[in-house]
Every structure is written in C-alpha cells, then in structure tokens.
Image: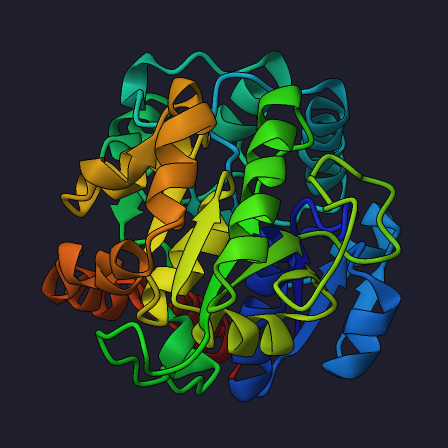
Amino acid sequence: MKIAIWGSYNYGNYGDDIMAVQFAKYLKSLNVEPVVYRLDEQLAQRYQLQTTDSLNELLSDAKFCIIGGGGFLVENFSAPFEEDFRCLHQVSIEKNCPVYPLTIGGEGLGKNASLSYWRREFFQGDMCQSCTVRLESDQALIEQFGKEAFYYADVLLSVAEFWQIKSQSKQNNTHHKTINVGINIPNTLQCKWLAFQLGIIASIRRDIVFHFIKTYLPSSSINSELRPKQLSSNIKYYVYTDPQSTLEFLASLDLVVSYKLHLGLTALALGVPFYSLGGSGKAKVFLNSIGADFAVWNPGDKRFKIAAFLSNPQNILQARNKFDFTIINKLSLNSWGHLDFLNKLVNNISSSLR
C-alpha cells in the first residue's frame, strides 16, 4: 500500500527533512510503502526511502497523501510555496487522492490569519481532509474551511523517544567540562556584529565553544545563515547533513540560540535550553506556550544584552533550570497524537481493502 508524503522538502532544510523522514520511518514500521516528494537523494538512500520529483508519480496509485508538517498556516507566503499549493490542489483532484495535512501550523493568529489564494482553494477543496495542527488556535482557522482539525503538540517534540537519542547529563558548575553553545543566526549586519563579539569572548574565555550551525544541507543553494569568518578551537562550524547526527549533536550542547523554530524545539525535546534570537512568530508562540517568554530575544537586544549573557558560563549552565520541563515532557507525550492519527488512517484503509 502506497502512501504519499508531500512537503517543502526540496530546500534541504533540517526542520522539514526531519519531519519527512520521521513520518516515512513511522509508515514503514506500519508495513506500508511511503514515497516522499522531492527529498534529497542522499537522505533517501541513507534511510532507505523512495522519493520522486514528480507530483504525478507521487500521487498516482497512492491510497492517500499526507502533508508532513510545515508552517503552511502562516500569513506571508512566497511565490514558490504558492505555486506548490496550486499544483497540489490540482493534481490531487486529477488523481482523486485525498490529502491529510499533519502537524501544520501558523504564527498564533488562528482564524484571523489571512491565507493566500491557492492555500484557501486547497483547504476548502474536496481533496483536503481532516488535519492535525500544532497550535490550538489553528483549529478555528481550519474549521472555517469546513474541515475537522485536531490539536497535538508539535510532532518533533517526540524526537528523543522516536530517534532514541539519549540526553546527556550536564552538571550545573563551570568546571565540569567545556561549555558548548549552538548559534544559528541570519547573515545580517546586526548578527555579524554579534558574531564578532562572540569571537572576542571565545578568545578570552577558553572554556566556552560557540558552534555556528547551518540548518541546510551542503547541497542546498540557500545561504541565509551566518558562517563565522574565522574558525578556531572555540569557534566551530556545524553543517546539517542528516537528522540523526544533528539530533545527536544538539543533545551534546548546553544551550541553543536560534532564529529557527525546529532547531530550538528539537533541542528542547532533548533537554537542551533554547533561546530564540529574532525568530519568527512561530518560535515566539511556541516559547510563550511553555511559559518561556524570557527566552525570546528581540532584534534590539542583539548588540549588548546577548553577548553579555553568553560571556557568563553560569548563565549558560543555569539556563536549563529556567524552563519547566514538566510542561515540555507532557507536550512530548501529546505530540505522538499526530502519529497515532496517521496510524488510524492506515488501519482504516487496510481494513477497507480486506
């Protein structure tokens, strides 16, 4: 039985890729045949998955298609994403292939979010079925299109258990080991200034290592994240190559500072504190939902406040204590609801074929 997985997987982005691979791995565990749309060939080979660049091939003979995660309920949408939805809407009709959007989300605007033309056409069309959303406020938006929506916490909060990543024990003192901080920031003038300051801090404080993180595959043409000009024993550069090794890398850190939601969210799921630096509305809404408003740094804070915070080992080592991991652990359990929903879909189709 073939199940299609559709998403924005042609950009080689960590957050999108890990959702695609996690859904595909889960479907394989249910003894069905997942096919992923436009997944990187090397990732497909590594995880023994089928992929195709043809939407016609993807949806042909598929019992159904899922949208495997994504910020598809945000207001601002670029032309390529809009074109993707036009194609999905039209080809799903041609192939008579029902589509179930799973763990999709917006920026906390709920039913007040204004979606672009082809997304509205898709969500209110006959091929779009019930959805799972990662923000409770998005239920009302989906229901406006006459579709049923179920809320579960972001599916990637399940990564520790799903990928069997062991969180590393970290003692709260400044002498236990070298302190490792993940830095993922855009290549802007303000952030270049911050990177310069971190370079000075690293040269003075030899016990802190800053790992600048690229969340796109080496083959990706996207180059929007800051890469340090000079590397040293205390300034390093980490490039995402596959979900498993990146999760293991994140688990080894003491703190992650990122403007990307899913880099920070998966770090938190592994027990590593996450501060959002000039992040999107998605990141802010998520941190607010777990009572971590303090972890939202605004762009105006970049120049002095952040460098001062990161120059103090105690700030870094005590950051974890500020987060309520009781809430995060509950959300991690709840996040399995997306996979349970998928399991029920597969069981329903299997039963109908007997």
Name the residue: 33% across, 60% down.
Answer: 313
Q: Is residue 312 left or right of residue 230?
A: left
Q: Position of residue 3 (x, y in %)?
A: 64, 66
Judge left or right: residue 240 versus residue 10: left
Q: Position of residue 203 (x, y in %)?
A: 59, 55
Determine the residue positioned at 74% across, 18% down: 79
- Estimate the x, y position of residue 121 in percent, counting from the top left: 57, 20
Q: Nearer the viewer, residue 202 or 10?
A: 202
In this picture, is 54 found above or below 249? above
Where 288 falls versus 183 (above or below)? Answer: above
Against 315, is 93 above or below?
Answer: above
Instruction: Please identify the quadrant where the N terminus is shown.
Output: bottom right
Q: Residue at x 48, y 51 (%)?
A: 262
Q: Is residue 352 left or right of residue 78?
A: left
| Display colour scheme | rainbow
- The reply to whether residue 133 is visible in this rendering is no
Q: Farthest front residue?
A: 204
Question: Within the image, what quadrant is residue 334 found in?
Answer: bottom left
Left or right side of 196 for 120: left
Q: Nearer the viewer, residue 109 or 83?
A: 109
Residue 308 vs 239, above or below: the answer is above
